[in-house]
Amino acid sequence: GKGKKTEGLPQWIYDELKSIANVSYRYADEGDVEEIVEEIAENMALWYGLPEERVLDGDELLFDDVVDNETVKDLLFNYLTPQNLRVDLMSSLFGRESNFDEAIKDQRKGNVGEKDEDCEDVDEGVIKPVHDHFEDDSEDEKETAFDTGKAGPPSIEPRFGTHYWKEKISTIIMQQWTDASKAQLPPAGFPLDLPPKNPFVPSQFDLKPLPTDDAAHPLVHCSVKVCVCVGKKKAWFPAVVTQYKMDGVHPKVLISYEDEDEKWHALDSPGNYEKFNAEDPLEPGFEGSLDKATFKFRVIGVPREGEGAVLRYGDADNDDDVEDGIAFPPIPPPSKNLPKLVYDNNSLKVWHLQDRKFKRPLGDLRIKVDCDGLNDSALNQACMNLFCRLCADALTETCYLASVCELGSSLYTTETGFGIRVHGFDHKLLELAKEVLALVMSFRGREGRSDLPPAIKEGRFDACLESLLRKYKNYGMNASSFCTGLRLLCLRPSHMTSNSKLKAIHGITIEKFVVTMNKILKRVSVEAFYHGNCDINDAKKASQIILGAMTSNCNHVGIPKTKIPAKLVVKTPLVVGQHSVTAPTLDPQDPNTAVEVYFQMGKDNLMNRVLVDMLVQVLDEPLFCQLR
């Protein structure tokens, strides 16, 4: 027989909302201390009605097992009514605050509102009447929009001095809203519907076990002193424990000494370390032995939660010398936990690193796609910008469902192609990545076709194109961004101006766009990095998902390594003074001035990058304090 119809919110929606709220609260990022205190203080207010035991989580979680449909109905039909409604409308059509006084003077002189209202335009900075866009069949009463010319002088908000008017909503509109708010079945073909069941709600939060050859241990990252016999004397050498593994049934630790020598030692009495955990951690002063009591060691420093290697006694006699700036701090040994290449074939490289620092059920997958010929023309770059907007637009509904489950994603253009990032709870992360990749790669293999992939809805091409053209037109109106653009234009041969991309893509048809993108995506090279609560099997699964998307619609052709686009920077000639570029801003009314000073440090290499990063780190705080 037919299923029984029930009123109220479906139970699965409530269960879904409750589960998402629990996950979001349990794994929330650490917030600002001041904001946390403010939120708790608000929750303690009497009008919230929260019991003392729910002051911390009462406004975040759902506690009942079933939804209270009577309360929902009471809220909908007795409180969410047009009679309890207030509409706040803010628009430059009512004038601009910057020259409000002048507009009011003109209004009082009769300069505004005297012309034929049906043909009046709205000029910036002048308050003029605006006409209603509501249509009503009644011939007895035609409603007009808010008219500043007839409204009289505005009220002034006492704290910020904001000008505003207030008036009652017309009886006609109120009656329309009241009629629409009555409980009734939706008409046939009504575009609103209940959301689908969210496929991205996570339910597994266990941390993946670390590999046996590089596992967790209380001694890892601890600073120790090892007693070593030198001749007939014993000497204590500073060192740090960098790795732990099980060699068969024998536990071993890798110790890095101050002279950068590394050595594996068998760990004696492994059962002595089983008692240490987050609540009862290992503490400085603990003593143990190595290699069947051949060496003794003493723990000098223990890392905090999530901290890396802790070193004591570098070139300083004690740690106070380092803090006082007398001695240079000890440099930690190179990390053993580096990304490993788990897939390298068919123009696809996938790197993997399992998290051992944050210890949360989160993952982060980043994919970089290099495209052949992207920088050949401004048209190619503009089409790539439009391609990313189209894909992001088509993924809006999917990404929204994922976002409420703390799964984020982004799609963006790069200098050599485009990038994809998917991050959040690792349980359903690869499912979202699979959907994003399927849509992105559906633009490949469309030779001889002039239509967009089915996932791109009708009319969205024109909407995304209009948005992109507006962005190009507005680029550089801000003095700071205009200054940055000029610097990049001087230094990067592949950098195209927004104006050149605007001209190249203006008036483009769907057919031309599809042909251009098919050419750009014909040969691609992909490199990915999967990091977080993911083991080697998860990384291999990600590799297969990416490879499957690359080869699903076409015979994949990769870019040879020698043909992968390079990121070139023009070498600036050496001069006694400096190279100066001066230009006026695009907006003549912009009172701001921007200055960028660029220092070129020579040919790019790892050491120079480290030194420049350290220099910036040293200069950043005093520079900020001085400018402040």
Image (cartoon, helix red, strand yellow):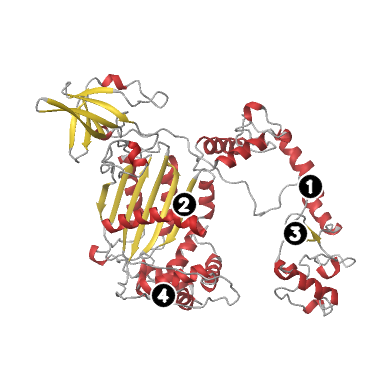
Residue under label 4, please give it: 378
Q: Is residue 609 left or right of residue 117?
A: left
The residues bearing labels 3 and 1 have C-alpha atoms spaced at a distance of 31 Å
Q: Residue at x 56, y 45 (%)?
A: 196
- Provide the secondary structure element on which disc 1 rests: loop
Which numbered circle lies on residue 161? Answer: 3
**Reading the chain from its start, which is encountered first: label 4 or label 3?**
3
Residue under label 1, please give it: 81
The residues bearing labels 4 and 3 have C-alpha atoms spaced at a distance of 47 Å
Residue under label 2, please give it: 409
| Residue 363 against residue 159 in the figure, above or below | above
- Provide the secondary structure element on which disc 4 rests: helix
**Reading the chain from its start, which is encountered first: label 4 or label 1?**
1
Amino acid at the residue labelled 3 = Gly
| Residue 321 against residue 228 in the figure, above or below | below
The residues bearing labels 2 and 4 have C-alpha atoms spaced at a distance of 27 Å
Amino acid at the residue labelled 2 = Ser
